[in-house]
Image (cartoon, helix red, strand yellow):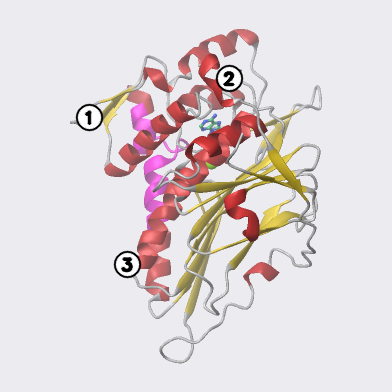
Amino acid sequence: MKGKRDKIFNNRMVRRVFLCLLLGIGAVGLLSGCQGAGRSGRTLSASREFFAMDTYMQILCYGDNCEAAADAAVEEINRLDALLSVGRADSEVSRINESGSGVLSEDTRTLAEAGIRLYERTGGAFDITVFPLMELWGFTTGNYRVPTGEEFAGALKLCDSGKLFLEEDSGKLTLAEGQGIDFGGIAKGYASDRLAGIFEEYDLESAYVSLGGNIHCYHKKTDGSYWRIGIKDPLHPEQGEAMLGVVSVADRAVITSGGYERYFTDEATGQRYHHIIDPSTGYPADSDLVSVTVVSAWGMLADGLSTSCYVLGLEGSIELWREYGSEPGGEFGLILMTADGVVYVTEDLKGAVETNYPAEIIGTER
Ligand code: AMP
Ligand code: MG
């Protein structure tokens, strides 16, 4: 796995440019001014705010069927939560983890296949069998602790999607003894894809969802302008409104991973440990990146890649983008920030990103 991973770490050649634009807007301001003219002269809107999938969620719908669409969206999120939550003993995922195998439903099969494909493409940086490690660190229960060396050895061996067996015909997934799966790295992106499907079904004019900070924008805003999505500044997380930058999009998921999202502090040492695990060490990923945002029409892909790139680091992420970023049907762009406060933007997003930080554009050539 290591050798394969090293291959991704090739030389890079980035063009240094400075995008020093003034932002002058807060996260709330980004969502304001969403009124426009609909068939009745006024666009109807509906919003929902609720807690699901272990996080705070917000849904905004615009169009004649907005109320029904918003209700259907909430129902869909709750359905997926019940299916995928590792915190619920009766979820499909928990039952598979408990018994070691099971025939997958359509949703979990889609997630498992995507998880395995990401595992292969990222040289193991993304691995849905991270569950025993998440348990060991206490992230599944909230009983956080730093595991001992001996404990690591066992859980590390179990973290290997190469040991999963998914039967093509029956859809039965079999885990190796002691293994467990966790779709936490892709579930919210999958959920936002499902919601985009619902918005299409209800013929909405426009919609916006934030699933714990994982954003998905459906169409443009009702006034015809792009959605302007603020990305949290990981260097100043205590200042709620501070932003790394803003990206303007329509019909895109904008999904960010960062170590500041979920973590605990070991009281004995003062050391902070976050929730994105590097499967090659069993420890929270410690790459040179402090924030990874993936922009794509496909939420599940964006979600999986944001987690992956956070593990891979700058060089690995750039190589991944160069290899797969323009693959038809799976295009994506990256907005990365390193610990020294430099923002890296892939060239496909060049015109869409504003930042006050020094920025470099990443081109396709090595
Ligand atoms: P995200 O916030 O999308 O970056 O995902 C973080 C979540 O993904 C964690 O809470 C875990 O449930 C899961 N996870 C952590 N590390 C990994 C990894 N290396 N590969 C796949 N999933 C992971
Ligand atoms: Mg993710």
| Residue tagged 2 | 6
Q: Earlier in the sequence, mark 2 or mark 1?
A: 2
Residue at (61%, 34%) from the top-left corner? 366
- Crowd band around label 1 with a 10 angstrom C-alpha radius: few (<14), some (14–19), many (20+): few
The reply to whether the residue tagged 3 has its Cβ within 8 angstroms of ligand 2 is no
Three-letter code, disc 2: Asp
Q: Residue furthest top?
A: 150
Of the residues shown, which amino acid type is indicated by label 3? Glu
Q: Is residue 237 visible?
A: no
Distance CA(mark 2)–CA(mark 1): 31 Å
Give the residue number, with chain letter if any, for mark 1. Answer: 168
> Is residue 184 in view from this perspective?
yes
Where is residue 264 shown, x and y percent of the image? 70, 33
Tell me if 237 is positioned left or right of 333 in this view: right
- Mark positioned earlier in the residue sequence (3 or 1): 1
Q: Earlier in the sequence, mark 3 or mark 2?
A: 2
Residue at 42% across, 91% down? 40
Question: Is residue 88 on the magenta stretch?
Answer: yes
Q: Are marks 3 and 2 in contact (CB under 8 Å)?
A: no
**x and y, in percent, of residue 267 in the image:** 78, 27
Determine whether 211 is above or below 118 in the image.
below
Q: What amino acid type should be assigned to the residue bearing mark 1? A: Glu
Secondary structure under tag 2 reads: helix
Region rendered in magenta? 75-96
Asked if residue 6 is positioned above or below residue 74 in the image, the reply reads: above
Give the label on residue 201, or none.
Answer: 3
Where in the image, quadrant-wise, is ligand 1 located?
top right
Taking depth in this image into account, of 104 and 362 the one nearest to the observer is 362
Q: Main secondary structure of the magenta part?
A: helix
Look at the picture and state if 264 lies above or below 32. above
Residue 299 position, x and y percent, is: 47, 50
Label 1 secondary element? loop
